[in-house]
Amino acid sequence: MTTEDDVVKAVSDLSESGAASERAALHSLGIGPNDAKVLRFLLAREDGDEPVTPRLLAEMLGISSAATTALIDRLADAGWVERVPFPGDRRSIVVRATIDDASPARHLLAVRRSSVAEAASRLGAAERRVIADFLDEVARAEKQHMERLSARTE
């Protein structure tokens, strides 16, 4: 019989393995957490209709436009992204990832996503729904707990 403690341990193990793989990926690629978040965001939206602008990146990260510009500069200097004119408005720019499909970097950035997708593919639709609802509930509860704790320390 699976107990609540078994579920807590499984989620904890998942968090620890995710943190370890993230540290290894960031170290291997020589980038920081926000850099990785931007690269993953850009890779996930490669085929999307909405161009990714610096403003969208700033909102996603919750950082200033100056910090976003510095981040894009750093990624562009390293060859991870490029700036291209915004379609129909040459005064604005779009940021795109320049990581080749076969690049080890692309695979390192996608370890969690591909691992979860592989495991989820072995489940039925009902099982996937239960797990997705459970994880959404854990994330929501954790966010609420952190907001309450932050409010107490202010």
Image (cartoon, rainbow, N blue to C red):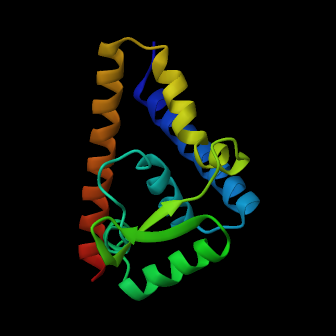
Observer-nearest of 30 and 78: 78
Identify which residue, 18 or 113, lies in the foreground.
113
Give the vertical position of 46 relative to 123 (above or below): below
Q: Position of residue 96 (x, y in %)?
A: 48, 61
Check the image and report above or below for 117 versus 42.
above
Q: Position of residue 146 (x, y in %)?
A: 32, 63
In the displayed image of the protein, which residue is found farthest to the bottom?
A: 66
**On the image, which quarter does residue 95 sit in?**
bottom left
Q: Image point 49% across, 28% down: which residue? A: 117
Q: How many marks?
A: 0
Q: Which residue appears farthest toward the right when viewing the image? A: 28
Residue at x 32%, y 64% (from the top left corner)? 87
Above or below residue 125? Residue 104 is below
Q: Is residue 96 left or right of residue 93?
A: right
Q: Position of residue 3 (x, y in %)?
A: 43, 23
| Left/right of residue 88 with respect to residue 105 in the rendered view | left
What residue is rendered at 46% in x and 22% in y? Answer: 120
Quarter of the N terminus within the rendering: top left
> Which quarter of the figure is the C terminus placed in?
bottom left
In the picture provided, is 14 more to the left or to the right than 100?
Answer: left
Front residue of 134 and 80: 80
Rendered residue at 40%/49% (across/down): 45
Residue 30: x and y in percent read 72, 67
Quarter location, residue 57: bottom left
Query: For residue 51, what is the image quadrant?
Result: bottom left
Task: Look at the picture and state if 81 lies above or below 154.
Answer: above
